[in-house]
Amino acid sequence: MTLDKTVATPAQAVADIPDGASLAVGGFGLSGNPMQLIQALLDHGAKDLSVVSNNCGVDDWGLGILLKAGRIAKMTSSYVGENKEFARQYLEGELEVELVPQGTLAEKLRAGGSGIAAFFTRTGVGTQVADGGLPMRYDADGNVLKASSPKPLHPFTPGPAAGLEEQQYVLEEALVTDFALVHALRGDRHGNLVFNKAARQFSPPAAMAGRVCIAQVEELVEPGELDPDTVHLPGVYVHRVVEVGSQIDKPIEKRTVRPATEHTSGGAES
């Protein structure tokens, strides 16, 4: 591995992702989806993929295009409500789904990238997240074929000096994947990345969790051009960088605008 981690095209960047690979994919809603890498992976043809991502895109965008083509065997996500094809495949027994609370999912990825095998959290205690029984796979008739297992609980008193009482915590195991795909606003040849606003949400922990992290960047700069204080993810976590330009499509999942207001001569809104 040289310090220059750039590759020429998205197709070259994902060419060695095999059938059955596990992927951590950045993005929050439609913000920060590594669309050029996802499209290249679709064209590449890898199937039976296990994907960890906050959501699965929508029917015709993001991870939704891999799902529609039948390339995803399992999704580990925290939010799946915007994809009709996702719901159909899940309920008809074509897709295995592991639902994880959003903050827990981010921490499972970050922990995996930090070498932390597991951690305890209060989130999910007293629910099926901890007790087990969440449906993960159905058959074609709607019967549950596979459900989540119970997770270990342990009592902790996190702040005895502050007078906090002992509470139960649930053990969550970290996530490590074969590959990670992320989108960044800017990156240099060493793999240092800068993300833009909401695109930063899941992208750094997803990148950290992948044994091989592939980053598409809108702008590629030379080493030393990025202010170290602005770097959101250091290049030690990134293995391949491909420039895709800034003129790429960036759809809005749900466009919500405020109606134009009209003002009377007295300044009051009508």
Image (cartoon, rainbow, N blue to C red):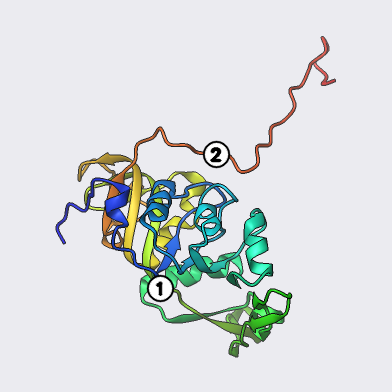
Q: Residue at x 54, y 59 (%)?
A: 67
- Is the C terminus in the top left, top right, bottom left or bottom right quadrant? top right
Mark 1 neighbour class, 10 Å CA radius: few under 14, some 14 to 19, many 20 or more: many
In this rendering, the answer to whether 162 lies above or below 52 is below
Mark 2 neighbour class, 10 Å CA radius: few under 14, some 14 to 19, many 20 or more: few
How many labels sit on residues? Answer: 2
Mark 2: amino acid: Pro
Residue denoted by label 1: 176
- Foreground residue, 250 or 226? 250
x, y percent for residue 92: 67, 69
The alpha-carbon separation of the residues under discs 1 and 2 comes to 29 Å
Q: Can the viewer see residue 192?
A: no
Mark 1: amino acid: Val
The answer to which image quadrant residue 167 occupies is bottom right
| Local secondary structure at mark 2 | loop
Q: Which residue is drawn at 42% across and 65% down?
A: 23
Residue ranking furthest to the left = 2
The answer to which image quadrant residue 22 occupies is bottom left
x, y percent for residue 197: 49, 45
The reply to whether callout 1 and callout 2 are in contact (CB within 8 Å) is no
In this rendering, the answer to whether 107 lies above or below 127 is above
Q: Which residue is drawn at 53% across and 47% down?
A: 61
Q: Earlier in the sequence, mark 1 or mark 2?
A: 1
Residue denoted by label 2: 251
In this rendering, the answer to whether 224 lies above or below 107 is above
Q: Residue at x 35, y 48 (%)?
A: 216
- Is the N terminus in the top left, top right, bottom left or bottom right quadrant? bottom left
Q: Is residue 261 left or right of residue 168?
A: right
| Local secondary structure at mark 1 | loop
x, y percent for residue 240: 27, 55
Q: Can the viewer see residue 161?
A: yes
